Structures are given as structure tokens and as C-alpha cells.
Image: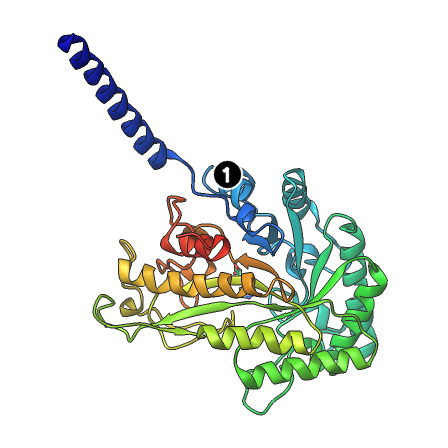
């Protein structure tokens, strides 16, 4: 009898141990909880992807599991779609758009009018001199109309104008080739042409540093002007290229970082646009993990290589990852608390390997700005986002 009981106890213990081990290995191998499911009903979770995404064995499953929307990183920009006047090259972009749609991902169009990645021919006359206003307007219309009609029904939302506001203190609009060729109303015309090309598409204004009060005021002025002139702008894209501020050379384990912008400023930005009648989207979210004293996202800024601004080449210290997670947590928390105001949160890339911040403002850095590391593993930032979305710990 006693032997029998002993045997039963042994079998039970073994069973329990096996179960426990099974559980543990199961937990270790279980994929991270799906972000898009956690956000369902509140906001869309998106990511920028490049031409390699469909064939990338790391990126593809992450996309399918966590994201509901994608933004082609470079393929819908003017230099990709119309390198020479009248010569539209849609093949590469079509492939990416079709890949996304086949997986039920919404595709965000980025971008029709910008001062970067736009070929010079747009702004040149036949004799090589500056283009006249009428010709520039016609080129603007042709580009917008052709691209939007090509993607009608497949790309249902467009960043119509990107970064039209000036960073120069006291200056309203950025001095761009479009502004020079057409005048300040090029923005209004862009929205008019977009509205006419595809009346069903969502039309956005997209920019960086709108968290800075003076630039936010410029944006509010622009939006009010556009509305007064009868243009339809459905929402504002906050690029959300955020950063941790570490003094170069500081030890991140002992020096607290200062995040820019802080959570209260981000939330106030959302509230201000909403009060003016515009929902917002975080369209290009990333949190720069490397030291440096610049912020914003002027892609034209090129600095000389400085090794002290590239200190985490072999891995990102836990204290930095934790500070970064707090920023991501704040953004997703704001999105959760304002589902009527924040439509979408998109990161600018999927894994740290694809981030543009590895090559800006100087090439060859090893940055760590996104939700997944170079091996596709979820980072503390990911879990902070998930906790904010689910309220679970
Ligand atoms: C970046 C791309 O990610 C890079 O590959 C490219 O070399 C430069 O542009 N703001 C924007 C995006 O609106 O289009 C930029 O994308 C990043 C900053």
C-alpha cells in the first residue's frame, strides 16, 4: 500500500515537473503577443517597409503578426515613381503594395509633394533655367493625378505634402523648390489636385517637430488656411522622430537620459490638433538611442563621422533600452487614452537593422531605435507598447 502511494506520488511529481518544463520552454519559444490585436478597435499599428521586406525572413513574419498597416519607405516618393518627366515607374512599388494587400495590410502613401527625393527636372525649364509657375503647377497636377489614380482602391491614404513648414525661427513656410517655382499656394494646389484625383482617398499633412510649440502654431496656421480655402485635410501626421538625449561620452548606466519630447508635450500636441478639428497619426515613430545634440528629421542634414556619437556598436545598454521603452510606452499610452484623436501609430521600420537612423546624420552607425532588435526579437520598447495597449503587466 505504502509502495503504491509512493509510486503515485513519484508519477505525479514527474508529471508536474514535465508540465512545468513544458510550460517554461513553451513560454520561451512562444511568439511575442501580437501588437495589432492588442490595439484593435483603438488605433492602427503600422510600420514603414522597404522593397526587401517581402523576401526578408525576419521582417515578414513580424509584419504579418504585429502590424495592420504599412508605409512604403521610399518606393512611393517622386524620384521612385517619375524619375524623368512622363516616365512613370510603378513596378517596384506595385510589387510591395500587392504584397501588403495580399496580407490584408492597409497601405499608406508617402509622399506626393516633398523637397527631398524629388528629381530636379520638376523645377527646370527646357533651357535649364528655373521653371515657370504654370509649368510647375501642371507638373504637380500630373504627378499627383497619375500616381493617385494608379493606386486608387489600393492606396487609400496619402501624405499629400511632407515637411512644408520652416525650421528657421520666425519663418512660416520652408523655402523649397516647390515654393520657389509656384509660390506659397503650392500646398493648397497639391490638396486640390489630390482631392480631384481620388475623392475617396484620405489626405494628410505630414511633418516633424510639431511637438515644438512654435512649429505646431505654424502647422495650425497652415491647416486653418487650407480649410478656409476649401481644401480637405483629413488628418495630421506627426512623424515622431523622437530621441534620448545623452551627453556624448556619458555612461548611460549612471547618467539619466532626457527624452525629447516629454510625454506631456506629445499629449498636448495631440490635444491641440484635435481641438482645431484634426485627428493625428504618429507616422514615422522611432526613438534614437545614440548621443547627439540634434533633433528632428531634416534628412538633408549631413554631419561628419564622429565615433563618440556611435558608442553602442556591439549592443545597446539595458539602461538605454529601458529609457527608450519609457518613450514608446508614453506614445502608446497617449494613443490608448485618446482613441478618438489618434488614428494610427506607425514605426519607421520594423527591426533596428532597417532604420534610416543607422545612416543619419552620418552613415554607418549602429542605432537601436525600433521595437525589434537586429535578430527580430521584441525589445523592452515592444513590451512597453504592449503593456500600454493592454493595461497588463
Ligand atoms: C527616409 C528613408 O527612410 C531613407 O531610406 C531615405 O534615404 C531618406 O528618407 N522623414 C520622412 C521620410 O518623411 O520619408 C524619411 O525617410 C525619414 C524622415
Q: Is residue 379 left or right of residue 341?
A: left
Closer-to-camera residue (121/117): 117
Q: Nearer the viewer, residue 71 or 35?
A: 35
- Where, quadrant-wise, is the N terminus in this rendering? top left
Q: Where ligand 1 lies, by quadrant?
A: bottom right
The location of residue 18, given as percent across then percent down, is 27, 23
Q: Is residue 181 above or below residue 289?
A: below
Q: Is the image coloured rainbow, by chain, by secondary structure, or in one colour?
A: rainbow
Residue extending farthest to the right is 196
**Residue assigned mark 1:** 61
Question: Where residue 320 sits: x, y (%)?
Answer: 31, 63
Tell me the quarter of the picture where residue 328 sits. Answer: bottom left
Front residue (pair 227, 39): 39
Q: Position of residue 279 (x, y in %)?
A: 66, 68
Exactly how many numbered labels are in the figure? 1
Residue 161 position in % (x across, y down):
68, 69
Q: Which residue is pictured at 41% across the width and 44% down the height? A: 376
Is residue 39 shown left or right of residue 317? right
For residue 132, say whether it is visible: no
Residue sitting farthest toward the bottom: 170
Helix, strand, or loop for circle 1? helix
Q: Is residue 158 above or below residue 35?
A: below
> Residue visible at 52% across and 68% down?
240
Foreground pick, 198 / 147: 198
- Quarter assignment of residue 117: bottom right
Question: Residue at 66% of width from left, 46% of height from top?
Answer: 97
- Where 26 falls versus 286 (above or below)? above
The crowd level at tag 1 (other Cα within 10 Å; few <14, some 14-19, many 20+) is some
Establish if 149 lies above or below 327: above
Does the numbered disc 1 mark a residue whose Cβ is under 8 Å from ligand 1?
A: no
Residue located farthest toward the front when viewing the structure as drawn:
1
Q: Is residue 170 left or right of residue 121?
A: left
Amino acid at each position: 500500500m505504502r509502495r503504491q502511494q509512493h509510486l503515485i506520488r513519484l508519477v505525479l511529481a514527474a508529471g508536474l515537473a514535465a508540465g512545468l518544463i513544458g510550460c517554461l520552454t513553451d513560454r520561451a519559444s512562444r511568439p511575442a503577443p501580437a501588437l495589432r490585436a492588442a490595439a484593435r478597435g483603438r488605433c492602427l499599428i503600422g510600420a514603414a517597409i522597404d522593397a526587401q521586406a517581402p523576401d526578408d525572413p525576419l521582417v515578414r513574419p513580424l509584419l504579418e503578426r504585429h502590424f495592420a498597416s504599412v508605409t512604403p519607405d521610399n518606393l512611393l516618393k517622386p524620384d521612385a515613381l517619375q524619375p524623368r518627366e512622363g516616365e512613370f515607374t510603378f513596378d517596384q512599388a506595385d510589387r510591395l503594395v500587392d504584397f501588403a494587400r495580399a496580407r490584408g495590410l492597409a497601405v499608406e502613401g508617402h509622399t506626393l509633394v516633398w523637397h527631398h527625393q524629388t528629381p530636379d527636372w520638376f523645377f527646370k525649364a527646357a533651357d535649364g533655367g528655373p521653371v515657370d509657375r504654370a509649368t510647375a503647377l501642371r507638373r504637380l497636377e500630373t504627378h499627383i493625378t497619375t500616381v493617385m489614380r494608379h493606386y486608387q482602391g489600393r492606396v487609400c491614404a496619402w501624405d499629400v505634402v511632407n515637411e512644408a513648414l520652416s525650421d528657421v525661427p520666425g519663418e512660416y513656410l520652408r523655402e523649397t523648390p516647390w515654393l520657389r517655382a509656384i509660390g506659397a499656394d503650392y500646398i493648397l494646389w497639391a490638396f486640390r489636385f489630390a482631392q480631384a484625383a481620388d475623392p475617396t482617398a484620405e489626405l494628410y499633412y505630414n511633418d516633424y517637430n510639431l511637438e515644438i510649440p512654435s512649429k505646431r502654431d505654424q502647422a495650425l496656421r497652415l491647416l486653418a488656411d487650407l480649410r478656409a480655402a476649401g481644401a480637405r485635410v483629413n488628418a495630421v501626421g506627426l512623424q515622431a522622430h523622437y530621441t534620448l538625449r545623452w551627453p556624448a561620452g556619458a555612461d548611460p548606466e549612471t547618467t539619466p537620459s532626457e527624452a525629447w519630447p516629454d510625454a506631456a508635450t506629445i499629449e498636448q500636441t495631440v490635444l491641440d490638433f484635435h481641438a482645431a478639428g484634426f485627428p493625428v497619426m504618429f507616422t514615422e515613430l522611432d526613438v534614437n538611442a545614440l548621443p547627439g545634440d540634434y533633433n528632428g528629421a531634416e534628412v538633408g542634414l549631413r554631419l561628419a563621422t564622429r565615433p563618440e556619437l556611435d558608442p553602442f556598436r556591439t549592443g545597446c545598454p539595458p539602461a538605454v533600452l529601458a529609457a527608450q521603452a519609457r518613450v514608446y510606452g508614453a506614445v502608446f499610452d497617449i494613443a490608448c487614452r485618446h482613441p478618438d484623436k489618434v488614428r494610427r501609430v506607425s514605426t519607421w521600420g520594423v527591426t533596428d537593422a532597417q532604420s534610416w537612423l543607422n545612416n543619419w546624420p552620418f552613415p554607418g552607425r549602429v542605432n537601436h531605435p525600433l521595437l525589434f532588435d537586429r535578430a527580430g526579437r521584441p525589445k523592452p520598447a515592444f513590451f512597453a507598447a504592449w503593456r500600454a495597449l493592454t493595461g497588463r503587466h
